Amino acid sequence: MKIQLKPAILVLATLVNIALLPKANATFKGNIRVRVDGLKNQKGQVCLNIFSTSKGFPSNDKQAIKARCVKAAKNSITVDFPDLIAGNYAVAVIHDVNGDNSKHSNRRIWFF
């Protein structure tokens, strides 16, 4: 005896199997490493802000998804931002020359 399966039954069985499979919710997380070279002086601090949208960019650290300040140094400064979900980001680097966290003209801003 020869059994014939109709195409509609095969399609239905495939769809049911797909619907019943467990969902894989893998989320890739990565790191951003920022290296700052060539500061004109070693006064104050260097603040780095990571943004996932244009809101607040480049200098509103309250709207950044990650923000960090480190003491300005003669040599290069390297700052790591771990565990970021895969996506597009903007980085703002701010040299706060007198280290007062204010929006005075003593700040130099670069963004990427």
Image: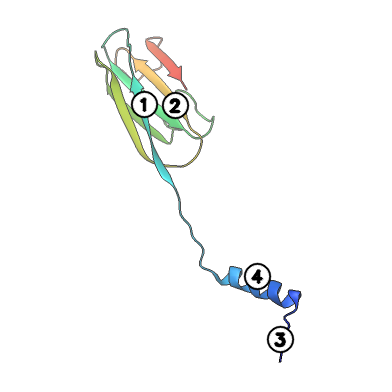
Of callouts 1 and 3, which one flags the residue occurring earlier in the amino acid sequence? 3
Instruction: Give the residue displayed 41% in from the left and 16% down from the top.
Output: 103
Of callouts 4 and 3, which one flags the residue occurring earlier in the amino acid sequence? 3
Query: What distance separates the C-alpha of mark 4 from that of mark 1?
Result: 46 Å
Q: Which residue is mark 1?
A: 34
Tag 2: Cα neighbours inside 10 Å, few (<14), some, or many (≥20)? many
Instruction: Give the residue displayed 40% in from the left and 28% down from the top.
Output: 49
Q: Which residue is mark 3?
A: 3
For label 2, the SS is strand
Is the Cβ of the residue at disc 1 closer than 8 Å to that at disc 2?
Answer: yes
Q: Tell me the tag on residue 15.
A: 4
Q: Tell me the tag on residue 91.
A: 2
Pick out the residue farthest to the front.
1
Label 4 amino acid? Leu
Q: Nearer the viewer, residue 76 or 11?
A: 11
Of callouts 2 and 4, which one flags the residue occurring earlier in the amino acid sequence? 4
Tag 1: Cα neighbours inside 10 Å, few (<14), some, or many (≥20)? some
Side of 67 relative to 4 (left or right): left
Query: Residue 111, percent across and down?
Result: 46, 20
For label 4, the SS is helix
Instruction: Give the residue displayed 40% in from the left and 21% down from the top.
Output: 93
